[in-house]
Image (tube, coloured by chain):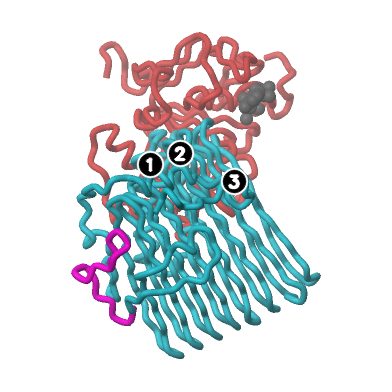
Chain colours: A red, B cyan
Amino acid sequence: MCPGQEFGTQVMLKIDNLRAEVDGKEILRGLSLAVNAGEIHAIMGPNGAGKSTLGYVLGGRPGYAPTGGSVRFDGVDLLELEPHERAAAGLFLGFQYPVEIPGVSNVQFLREALNAQRRGRGEAALSGGEFLKLARAQADALGMDQEMLKRPVNVGFSGGEKKRNEMVQMGIIGPKLAILDETDSGLDIDALKAVGDGINRIMRAPDKAVILITHYQRLLDYVQPDFVHVLEAGRITRTGGPELALQLEREGYGVAA
Amino acid sequence: MVSTLELPTPRMEEWRWADMQALRSAAEAEPRVTGLDPADLFLDLDGPRLCFIDGAFEPAHSRPGAVQVTRQIVSSTHPLASLAEGEGWSLHIEPEHAVTAIQIVHLGSGGESHVPARIVLAEDAVASLVETYAGVGWANRLTSISLARGARLMRSVRLLQDEGFVSVRDEAEVGEAASLVSIFLGAGGMGSRIDGALTLTGKGAFAEMGGALLTRGSQRQECAVAVRHEETDGSSRQIWRAVAADKSVASLAARVEVARGAQKTDGEQSLRGLLLDRTATVNLKPELEIFADDVKCAHGATVGELDKNALFYLESRGIDKARATAMLTRSFVADALSRIGEDAVREAFEADADKWLGGTL
Ligand SMILES: Nc1ncnc2c1ncn2[C@@H]1O[C@H](COP(=O)(O)OP(=O)(O)O)[C@@H](O)[C@H]1O
Ligand SMILES: [Mg+2]
């Protein structure tokens, strides 16, 4: 803990005046946001506002080019790291559209991912047996069929199964900061509850934090955010508590705060 | 011999992608010590073993069992295969008998070598076979295959020469309800031409020829396969994958012919290329020639690059770019290699592909 900071108020992620372009078009236009350990932040906003772009820029996706501002994650310059190094540093990106990868099984993918991260942090790799135990426990906790662990990554999974699989991955990897991009879209009520419970169980801890990008207030019934932000036209325009989400649900984004 | 060799030229349609210059250089290369021990080239399988070094049978590394070493006269008119005369091997299996896990290793040290092979399976006979090409030089082979009613042959061939050239030609007749599966992996540094003419001569026959060609540097590999359906109710499969890096060229030409009267034919053809670099080339030439009306022929031919979404997905989970590329490339060739029936053989071929990927990315 840094001197002068109380437990639970350490800044984990500090985004200052971030600008970023996609295809030569500026999408993030001076976005600032600070996330402390132990906090859950919801980011809401209209379609096309730049929410997914924010996730991709933080994840380091090629083509999503930062052009100004800074991002510090646990004191390091996040934008300097390769995508896999960001993962090893503790960043997890939950995808709005998880990708199908034929020919690579879920277990092979996740074991390789976890062990690569562990090596990156100077920790010992998990054996096949240790890994399977961990994977099975996480699949069980998310209500995902064990058989799906053996199937190729996301291939033939329904929308809800893909999102559950993202949560299983998050549980196995155990990140410090999770940025979850519309993990709630396309979920029925049971899956929504399972995903919500998963987020609380895996990420609700004093040394972890979550940025929950969502369109709807309904996920926030399961995962209580500490802060709700509105992202519009590439920057954060409003910040409040859980009541802001309810207000947005009633009144839409067009209404002044 | 090479100086008088009449090689096909690119002006001949079926040879337009062939790298005959590489073949000629391989044939003219001075012999050299490869440092390879034939014993290391056999898989740990319990079955007959034959080793040919520079085309000559090598008893010290062989235990031929049911396979015979014979001199053969070749009747093929194929421009390269017709040269494959002299000492070779043959396998004749009696009705309802089985010989499995046969291994043939071809090790070259330079120059040219020609070996003919003949496989004749009587009714309901079964055989499985693994062939490995290693070393350097030009290895030229003809394999004549004849399967009687209900016979089954599974053949897996890996081209792992460090350099030089491998040309293999298969000429097969597949009888009633017989099944031929030949899967190839080109994962060495040599040039290659995998050439096949499979004819389904019996009702309900099955023939498959496919595999994966991995090329890099300035290497060129190709396959040129024609499958001909002459009888009704036959099925055939040609599943080929080509992966090309650097300035290499991989070419896949595959043809299905359905003769008049060969109704209820089911032909599947899938040719797919993956470019690891923009400077690499994959040529695809799918061809269908159908003279019957009640026929099902699924076919697809595509060339592309790795899916960037998938790459970023793997990287975002902590896998570095080279490894993520290797995983996706491996999954790209997986369909082709998954056709190998025996686990141990398939795993060995997958390991060869992994080794290639490890050395390329
Ligand atoms: N890969 C891309 N190529 C071109 N434009 C993109 C790409 N991704 C996003 N955009 C554009 O960036 C803007 C923000 O998109 P996005 O971040 O997906 O918004 P949100 O997630 O808030 O709906 C949109 O105008 C969108 O059209
Ligand atoms: Mg979005």
Residue A93 left/right relative to A216: left
Residue B149, horizontal then vertical, whole percent: 56, 86
In reply to whether residue B61 is colored magenta, the answer given is: yes
Residue A222, horizontal then vertical, whole percent: 54, 40
CB of mark 1 within 8 Å of CB of mark 2? yes
Q: Is residue B310 above or below residue B161?
A: above
Q: Please, what secondary structure does the residue beneath circle 3 have? A: loop
Q: Quadrant of residue B293?
A: bottom right
For the point 44% across and 36% down, the residue is: B218
Residue B35 left/right relative to B233: left
Within the displayed image, which quadrant is ligand 2 positioned in? top right
- Distance from disc 1 to disc 2, alpha carbons, whole Å, reads 8 Å
Q: Residues within 10 Å of mark 1 (few under 14, many from 20)?
A: many
CB of mark 3 within 8 Å of CB of mark 2? no
- Give residue B16's mark: 3
Q: List the residue tagged with mark 2.
A: B314
Of marks 3 and 1, the one in the foreground: 3
- The three-letter code of the residue at mark 2 reads Leu
For the point 45% across and 32% down, the residue is: A178
Which chain is indicated by disc 2?
B
Give the magenta-colored segment's residue range.
B51-67
Q: Quadrant of residue B94?
A: bottom left
Q: List the residue tagged with mark 1.
A: A113
Residue A255 left/right relative to A32: right
Residue B51 left/right relative to B232: left
Q: Residues within 10 Å of mark 2 (few under 14, many from 20)?
A: many
- The three-letter code of the residue at mark 3 reads Arg
Residue A76, horizontal then vertical, whole percent: 35, 17
